Image (spheres, grey):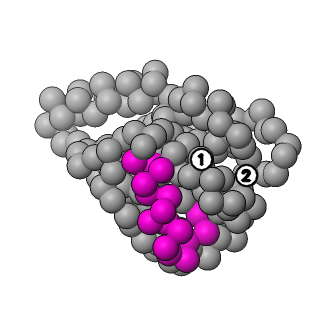
Amino acid sequence: HLHALEHPTLVYLAGPDGYPNDVRLRGFRDACSRLGVEGSELGPFAARFQDGVRAADLVLATSETAVVAYNDEIAVGVINRLADRGIAVPGDVSVVGFNDTQLAEMVTPRLTTVRIPGPVAGTGAIQMLLDLGGGHGLRCRRGRCAPLVLRLGGELGEERVEDVLVLQAQDVAAGGVL
């Protein structure tokens, strides 16, 4: 999505240390490398609005034109701080969050956000456990991984996009956002 918008530089705002952040960070790095996009990382940040406000000031000190935040709360904090500083979202800087929370619809402009459908992710997790129990090891086979759902917010200007795009991903990570 951000690559299609022709952003030359991206920044990932890392969340708390742990598996979810590790997977998203790895996906971000892999996607940047695969697409030939310059990516950087800031953080870690607590997964809260206030930390997004703090992160926005750090983003402004860089040349990045797009932000991929660990979650929607950080992303909304970034959007609010950028607005306070007179920076237009998505005009000057694009912001993408994760988790598709209700907060994504409450902010103006609406947040572009990614979610992993719970039932699909749960089914995939159970299958991975069954594979592990069967001696096959943990792996994510093509077509059996959870899709990423990208709900577009303000990234396309004032037009509100209701369609939900399902992106197949080799792993559940930030790669589908880029």
Query: Toward the viewer: 163 or 39?
Result: 39
Percent x, y for residue 157? 82, 51
Q: Measuring 32% from the left and 30% from the top, which residue is drawn there?
A: 125
- Does 60 sit above or below residue 90? below
Give left or right: position of 44 versus 169.
Answer: left
- Residue assigned mark 1: 80
Q: Can residue 148 be seen from the camera position used here?
A: no
Task: Spot the residue most to the top.
Answer: 119
Q: Secondary structure at mark 2?
A: helix
Percent x, y for residue 145? 43, 40
Work out which quarter of the rendered image holds the N terminus and state it.
bottom right
- Does 31 sit above or below residue 104? below
Decide whether the magenta segment is chiefly helix, strand or loop: helix
Query: Toward the viewer: 51 or 85?
Result: 85
Q: Secondary structure at mark 1?
A: helix
Q: Measuring 62% from the left and 60% from the top, which residue is drawn there?
A: 85
- Residue assigned mark 2: 155
Q: Which region shows up in magenta?
A: 51-66
Q: How many marks?
A: 2
**Three-letter amino acid code at the position of disc 1:** Asn
Mark 1 Cα shell of 10 Å, populated few (<14), some (14-19), many (≥20): many
Q: Measuring 46% from the left and 21% from the top, which residue is drawn there?
A: 119
Does label 1 or label 2 sit earlier along the sequence? 1
**Residue 10: mark:** none
Work out which quarter of the rendered image holds the C terminus and state it.
bottom right
